[in-house]
Every structure is written in C-alpha cells, then in structure tokens.
Amino acid sequence: MSSQNVNLLKISVLKHIRNLINCLVNIKDESGEFIMTLEDGRKIDTKGWNDWEWTHGIGLYGLLKLHEITGDKDALDISLAWFKDRFEIGTTKNVNTMSPLLSAAYIHEAKKADYLVHLDSWAEWVMYDMPRTDEDGLQHITYLTPNYQQLWDDTLMMSVLPLTKIGLVLHRPHYVEEAKRQFLLHIKYLQDVQTGLWFHAWSFDGRHNFCNARWGRGNCWVTVAIPDFIEMLQLSETDGVRKFLVTSLVAQIDALVKCQDQASGLWHTILDDDTSYLESSCTAGFAYGILKALRLRLIPKEERYLTAAKKAVDGILANITPEGELKLVSFGTPVFSDVEEYKKIPLTAMPYGQSLALIALTEYLRTFI
C-alpha cells in the first residue's frame, strides 16, 4: 500500500483507543481510597474493573460502541467475560447498577449471549418497583442513599436508556413510552431555562435545585443520552417528542460552546465557573454528543459547533497518557448544597473516564470511515 494512502490520524486515534481499553480493564485502587463500604459490610470497588456499578456500565458502553463500529472482537470478549462473572454473583438493584443492562440489551439483541432473564428482571424492577418521586419520576436511589424525592440528570443515562433499549429488544412498548416520559419530566425540572445548561438535581421535597450547580459530568450524560435516545427509537423529524428533545439539546450545546475553555478545549467541572478545575470526562461526553448531533443532523454543521467538537477532541487526546489513562477525571460526585464542594472532588483514573474518552474517539473515528 502506498504511504500516501495511509490515514495517519486514523491510525493514531485507533492507538489511543487500544491504550484506553487496556487501562480501562487494568485500573486498580491501590490505596483503597475509592472503595465504597456499604452498611451490610460489602465493599464496592468503583475504580477497578471487577465490580458492578455505574462506573462499569459506562465502561461496557464504550466497549460496545467500539465493537459496533469496528467489529473489534477483544472489546466484545471483555464485555462477555464481565457479564459472565457479574451475573453469576448478582448485586443490589438501584439506579446506577442498572447501567450495565444497556450494553447487555445490545449484546442480547445481536445474539452474542442470552441475557433474557436478566433484561426482564431489571426492566420490570425499574418499571414497577424502583422508588418514585412526585409526578412518578425515577428516584435516584443508589447503594448508599435513597435520595428521597430527587431527580438527577445522571438517571437518564444510567436507567432510562437501558429501559428504552430493553423495551425495544423485548418488544415491550410500554417501557419505551415510560422512557419518553422520563426524558420530558427530567427536562422539565433540571434544564435551566436561563442558560440552557442543566442543574445536577431537583428535589420535590422542598422544590429546589439544591445549590443550582451546573455540573459538568451531569450535563454530559444529557449530551450523550439525547442523541442516543433519538437514534435508538429512530424518531422521525416530525415526531413531537423528538422535536422537543432537539430543542433542549440545542439550547444546551449552544450554552456549552460559550463556556468551553478555549486554550485547552476542556470544560470546567462547574461549567459556568472558571475558578473550578478543568475536567476531561465531561469534555469527552460533550465531544461525543456534539459529534453525534452533527452526524444525525440534530444541529447544523456550523463552524462554532465543528470548532467546539474539534477543540474537545484535541483536549482529550492531550490528556491521555502513553499508558492510556485519561487524566483530569473527577471521582463520583454526589449532589451538594454548596457549589464549592464540587471543586473539592479528587481527580483519579476511573472506568467512566476511560469509556467517555473511548466513545468520543470512536464517534470521531467515524469521520474517517
């Protein structure tokens, strides 16, 4: 093959992707600092690969996206091994542990494994047994706290997208309709009508958005979830729900373009507060969402959007070490009553950081295919 026919940028992106995956499955919490200890004595390793939390669910989704686009067998094999080990052990159902079921639904649909009983059990739990807020919202219950009457922007990614995909795979349209309603309800209470950005959470108990934190990674789940939801359901351009979702997404992306750090291409962990640190996992989520929104023509190919996406990708690449670790990733973050607390969350390698970089670069890779 002639050297002039070799796409060096594509080769470079693929190398970064391989390194990200290698780091993803080999991350270890050497100090024990990031182990979550439950009341019953169980210890959940949110940082390492061999446990079951939302951190791993997002990791699996990154592997799935790579396999879908490139046919990468290793990505599929890693996922199949993870599910085999985890389903044998089981875990507590909550809004975050639902996250891996999104990838499980895709794998089941492709007939790479039979997860029927698991998909059925988890989706039925979300539909009928998961705690609800007023207006029948999905309450953001986690391992550690029920988060009474609270809606979080994370929920759309962690539980609503899996419910949607399972509804499609198992031919249960009532799951899909419930997922649509959850998207609309979360937009109603979490999107800031003044800026277009999203608040981290809403509480019906007192009816407030806590400290009105426009938190980076929480926002990025929305930028990822809305294009994925529209694509997943193949909503037509005349569909009313699609139109509503697109206007919400455009308002958010327009706001993101304005607050991106121009020097690094990254976003701050509190998006509209440049005294907060720059954070790469949210940047990767924004890169993915903006690139996908451009590809699906949810936003026009205007220079401001193209530039923001390119700067974000460059910022991600600049923060991947030779060993494949995405730097500047904030640890799991609860809802705080003081914005200053978000600035104190430590930075550490995490599966979701690896995976968000992975899906961003995988979507970017589509440019070259």
Image: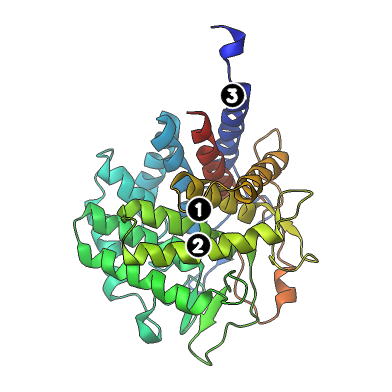
Kindly report the distance in space between the C-alpha atoms of the residues bearing marks 2 and 1. 9 Å
Q: Does the rendering let one see residue 96?
A: no
Q: Secondary structure at mark 2?
A: helix
Kindly report the distance in space between the C-alpha atoms of the residues bearing marks 3 and 2. 32 Å
Residue 38 % position (x, y): 52, 70
Q: Quadrant of residue 121?
A: bottom left
Pointer 2 local density, CA inside 10 Å: few below 14, some 14–19, many at least 20: many
**Between residues 349 and 244, which one lies in front from this camera angle?**
244
Tell me, yes or no, whether the two marked residues, 2 and 1, touch with CB atoms within 8 Å.
yes
Q: For the point 62% across and 72% down, which residue is it?
A: 195
The color scheme shown is rainbow
Q: Which residue is mark 2?
A: 249
200 left or right of 298 in image: right
Please tell me which of labels 2 and 1 falls first in the chain.
Answer: 2
Q: Does the rendering let one see residue 357?
A: yes
Q: Give the amino acid at mark 1.
A: Ile
Q: Which residue is mark 3?
A: 11
Q: Secondary structure at mark 3?
A: helix
Q: Give the amino acid at mark 3.
A: Ile
Q: Which residue is mark 1?
A: 299
